Image (spheres, helix red, strand yellow):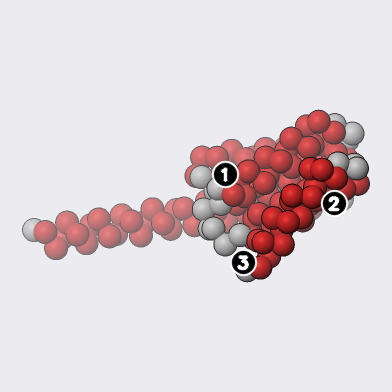
Amino acid sequence: GEPALHFDMEKRLVDLLGKEERFRHQGEAMYTMANQLFTSGEFEEAEKWYARTQKLAEAHGFFSLESRRCLGLGLVALEEKRDKDGMELLWNSLVAARLDEIEDGLSELSALTVLIPVLTTRKELDEAEPLVLRFREAAKEQ
């Protein structure tokens, strides 16, 4: 009867959440691999791992992972002197951070921590100034 149906639905939910958690861990591992490759100067290989991370993040709505992926790819692009692509990816990171499913504000702080110094270094102070204010607000919310 009905209790058996309820139990079956709960079991399916637990199974789905378990799969989601495994996908999240897989994405985190892929992101870590991409960062390690980036740090060691293997930009082309890092880009491949960031792309794999993107596919998983998009498929499962992991905006925090997508935000960090955009940060990594943006930094790769800037390192390779692809400034337009790099800046677009850094801005995309901030957008994805604001959609973060965890909603703890840490993705936004991470994105701002990277974007503000890049903008300042590029002398784009009019762009950086409102982000500094947002950073202060977000940090106070923690």
Q: Quadrant of the N terminus?
A: bottom left
**How many C-alpha atoms fall within 10 Å of the one at disc 1: few (<14), some, or many (≥20)?**
many
> Within 10 angstroms of label 2, few (less than 14), some, or many (20 or more) residues?
some
> What residue did someone put label 2 on?
117
Q: Quadrant of residue 74?
A: top right
- Residue farthest to the left? 1
Tag 2 secondary structure: helix
Q: Secondary structure at mark 3?
A: helix
Confirm whether residue 38 shows in the render: no
Crowd tier of the residue under label 3, counting other residues whose Cα lies within 10 Å: few below 14, some 14–19, many 20 or above: few
Q: Residue at x 56, y 42 (%)?
A: 56
Q: Nearer the viewer, residue 117 or 72?
A: 117
Q: Earlier in the sequence, mark 1 or mark 3?
A: 1
User: Which percent across, then down, holds residue 14?
Assistant: 35, 60
The quadrant of the image that shows the C terminus is bottom right
Tell me residue 96's x, y (percent): 61, 45
Callout 2, which amino acid? Pro
Residue under label 1 = 57
The CA span between labels 1 and 2 is 26 Å
Q: Nearer the viewer, mark 2 or mark 3?
A: 3
Q: Are marks 1 and 2 in contact (CB under 8 Å)?
A: no
Q: How many marks?
A: 3
Judge depth for marks 1 and 3 and give the one in front: 3
Residue 127 in the figure: left or right of residue 64:
right
> In the rendered structure, which disc, 1 or 2, sits on the residue that comes first in sequence?
1
Q: To which residue does mark 3 refer?
A: 141
